Image: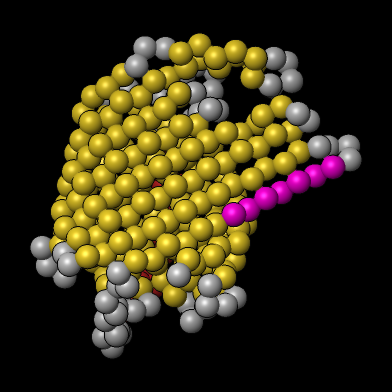
Amino acid sequence: MLSKILKSAIPAAILAMPVVSLADDAPAAPAPPPPPLTATAQVGYVASHGNTVASTANLKFDGVYNVDAWKHELTLAGLYGKSTGIVSAERLDAAWQSNYAFTDRLYAFGALHYDDDKFSGFQYQETAAVGVGYSIFKQSDATLDAQAGVGERRLRPELIGKDAAGDVISRTPLEAESGAVATATLKGSYAFNASTKLIDTLHLETGKGDTLLQNDIGVSVTMSSALSLVAAYEIKHNSSPPAGLGKSDSLITFNLAYQLK
């Protein structure tokens, strides 16, 4: 478990290094006020034909609405893959968070998270949490936010039966579980220049029965005022998946992103 945590935390540490170094230099320009509404949609698709027939598609959407002391953010992500006519990946991840700023850096939040991954060993995992956050860095080219909270999580594991080729042939739902959960998130960004930005989010949910650790790191390269290319790497680790399933899953994506205006 420790090695998995370290593996997921390393990208966040790498992100933090250049941000921390800014503190030792001359004060950087403060971040400008955020626009009232921003929305970005991403899409990626890969297909192969011939000896291997496979296709994979992923969609992402992120919307942020700022009004007075409030910030509301909706994040949606979907993944679907098929190989030789057999579904090999199917996932929906949705998150909502509302922040209320007490100061320029300190805020309280309420968050909802729903994860439905058909190949993770859980029919679903859903979490509701409240807590506090603090903007450690809030500059024009670098940001770093940390937050922690408590709440309740409900999940339903399932036993997945596979044939000799590894294809899923049966699903047996197990008893749903619920209980208290603690959450922690470290989210930051660093702009290397006007067109290239590094973004990293490390998220932890831990409670009785399972600990979910997820790290998403990506590089965005702007091509125009609305279009950009995004290369991302995600690793997700469940400490106690149902028997016969691995604890970790990783995903590499190359997407075209469009900023809605």
User: What quarter of the picture does the C terminus occupy?
Assistant: bottom left
Q: Nearer the viewer, residue 98 or 22?
A: 98
Q: Is residue 118 above or below residue 111?
A: above
Residue 221: x and y, percent? 56, 71
Magenta stretch holds residue 46: yes
Is residue 89 left or right of 152 when viewed as pictured? right
Q: Nearer the viewer, residue 208 or 168?
A: 168
Residue 96: x and y, percent? 32, 47
Is residue 46 left or right of 6 when viewed as pictured? right
Q: Is residue 151 above or below residue 217?
A: above
Query: How many discs mark residues in the rendered view?
Result: 0
The residue at 74%/20% (across/down) is 165
Q: Is residue 104 above or below residue 3?
A: below
Q: Residue furthest bottom?
A: 26
Residue 145: x and y, percent? 28, 61
Q: Nearer the viewer, residue 153 or 192?
A: 153
The residue at 38%/30% (across/down) is 125
Q: Residue furthest left?
A: 102
User: What range of the chain is rendered magenta?
Assistant: 43-49
User: What quarter of the picture does the N terminus occupy?
Assistant: top left
The residue at 50%/11% (across/down) is 172
Magenta stretch holds residue 151: no
Whether residue 65 is visible: yes
Color style of the picture: secondary structure
Is residue 235 left or right of 213 when viewed as pictured? right
Image quadrant assignment for residue 102: bottom left
Q: Nearer the viewer, residue 252 or 227?
A: 227
Whether residue 250 is visible: no
Overall secondary structure of the magenta section: strand
The residue at 26%/45% (across/down) is 111
